[in-house]
């Protein structure tokens, strides 16, 4: 059987509007180029893993949607990317989640999420997930679903023999008990500062090793700090790895972190060493920010390989 990975998390329909600048409180800004694009951090990661893993890696998504047209679109988008959606269940208590996204001309964004059915992914659902976890090499998580469900599922995934990857977004405090069930933690700069209870500051490659050690002390074995155009820094046990970024002209950064996590998981699932997996993830994320939208911005495997060959 081909190696497999599972994504547990959110599914949202994204409503994306291009603006000249992000609105200040009380300000009305005229937008342009409205698009409705499948999203949600969980679904983004599953879609990216499906596209990048191709026929070599089996990908399954576990999550919740409502009984509505948005749910049909989201599951169809995942299925088109080769993702198994049999563990995506509908709930009558909530509509499918939505995200309202403004993107300015520099590619920066502002996002408001109405979680809807994602909040109906409850601890009682974790038992049914175990069958999906069994035999998987990696299970990916984010924080757009209830924390108690994520924590219980992290433990269950480990008990079934999988390694766990957590993207701690949206940023929020997490207990040591929670983080102890994480094998690979992948925060960006602001998320890292939130986890440590520190003011959010810009992190350089020179600052990254000390910050990663502080995060590792909270429980995860491996910490990968995502540093945008600087690339990333990985503390894998005692080994530090600097992985350079790829300068590109950013158009929309909405799903860059999701693309990074998915491509990292795909590469590791295929048995690639960490250094190679980080380079692959940085390349995929760099391509994604040059395109508008979440799942629509994810490159193909061939695009990433050609991009890396040219660098």
Image (cartoon, grey):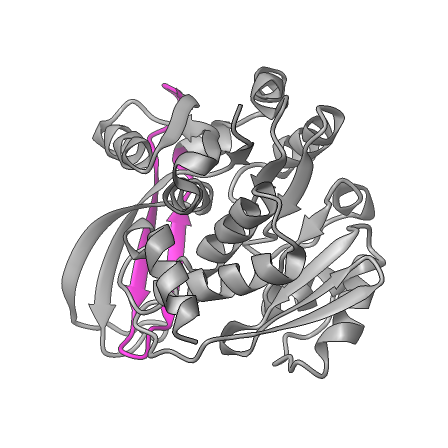
Image quadrant assignment for residue 115: top left
Q: Where is residue 217 in the image (x, y as percent from the top left)?
A: 85, 58
Instruction: Say above or below: 259 vs 69.
Output: below
> Which residue is found at the position 60% from the left and 29% from the top?
136
Quadrant hosting residue 12 = top left
Residue 199 percent location from the top left of the image? 68, 75
Q: Residue 57 in the image: x percent, y percent?
A: 48, 36
The residue at 74%/55% (across/down) is 222
* 223 left or right, relative to 48: right
Give the extent of the magenta segment: 89-116
Tell me what residue is drawn at x 46 percent, y 76 percent.
Answer: 246
Q: Is residue 155 left or right of residue 40?
A: right
Is residue 130 found inside the magenta-colored segment of the image? no
| Residue in the foreground of this view, choosing between 74 and 91 | 74
Residue at the far front in the pictured view: 309
Q: Is residue 208 above or below residue 214?
A: below
Q: Does the magenta stretch include residue 112?
A: yes
Is residue 254 at all visible to an observer of this figure? Answer: no
- The quarter of the image holding the C terminus is bottom left
Q: Which of 54 and 27 is in front in this view?
A: 54
Residue 47's image quarter?
A: top left
Count of numbered circles in the view: 0
Please name whichever residue, 46 or 200, is drawn nearer the observer in this view of the structure.
Answer: 46
The answer to whether residue 62 is visible is yes
Q: In this view, does 307 lie above or below 122?
A: below
**Residue occupying image coordinates x 51% and y 75%:** 245
Residue nearest the viewer, comparing 212 with 286: 286
Q: Is residue 227 left or right of residue 212?
A: left
Percent across and percent down for residue 50 are 40, 40
């Amino acid at each position: 059987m081909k190696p497999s990975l599972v994504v547990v998390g959110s599914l949202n329909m994204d409503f994306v509007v291009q603006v000249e600048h992000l609105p200040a409180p009380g300000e009305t800004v005229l937008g342009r180029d409205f698009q409705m694009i499948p999203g949600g951090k969980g679904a983004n990661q599953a879609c990216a893993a499906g596209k990048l893993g191709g026929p070599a890696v089996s990908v399954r998504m576990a999550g919740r949607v409502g009984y509505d047209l948005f749910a049909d679109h989201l599951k169809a988008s995942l299925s088109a990317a080769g993702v198994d959606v049999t563990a995506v269940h509908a709930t009558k208590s909530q509509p499918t989640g939505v995200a309202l996204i403004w993107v300015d001309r520099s590619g920066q964004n502002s996002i408001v999420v109405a979680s809807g059915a994602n909040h109906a992914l409850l601890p009682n659902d974790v038992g049914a997930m175990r069958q999906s976890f069994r035999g998987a090499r990696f299970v990916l998580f984010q924080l757009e679903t209830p924390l108690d469900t994520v924590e219980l599922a992290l433990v269950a995934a480990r008990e079934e023999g999988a390694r766990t990857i957590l993207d701690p977004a949206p940023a929020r405090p997490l207990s040591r008990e929670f983080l102890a069930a994480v094998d690979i933690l992948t925060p960006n700069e602001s998320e890292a500062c939130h986890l440590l209870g520190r003011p959010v500051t810009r992190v350089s490659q020179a600052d990254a090793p000390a910050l990663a050690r502080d995060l590792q002390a909270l429980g995860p074995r491996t910490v990968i700090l995502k540093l945008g155009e600087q690339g990333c820094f990985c503390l894998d046990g005692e080994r530090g790895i600097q992985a350079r970024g790829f300068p590109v002209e950013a158009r929309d950064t909405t799903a860059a972190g999701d693309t990074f996590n998915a491509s990292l998981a795909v590469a590791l699932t295929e048995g690639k060493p960490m250094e190679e997996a980080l380079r692959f993830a940085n390349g995929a994320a760099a391509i994604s920010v040059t395109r508008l939208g979440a799942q629509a911005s994810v490159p193909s495997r061939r695009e990433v390989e050609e991009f890396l060959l040219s660098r």
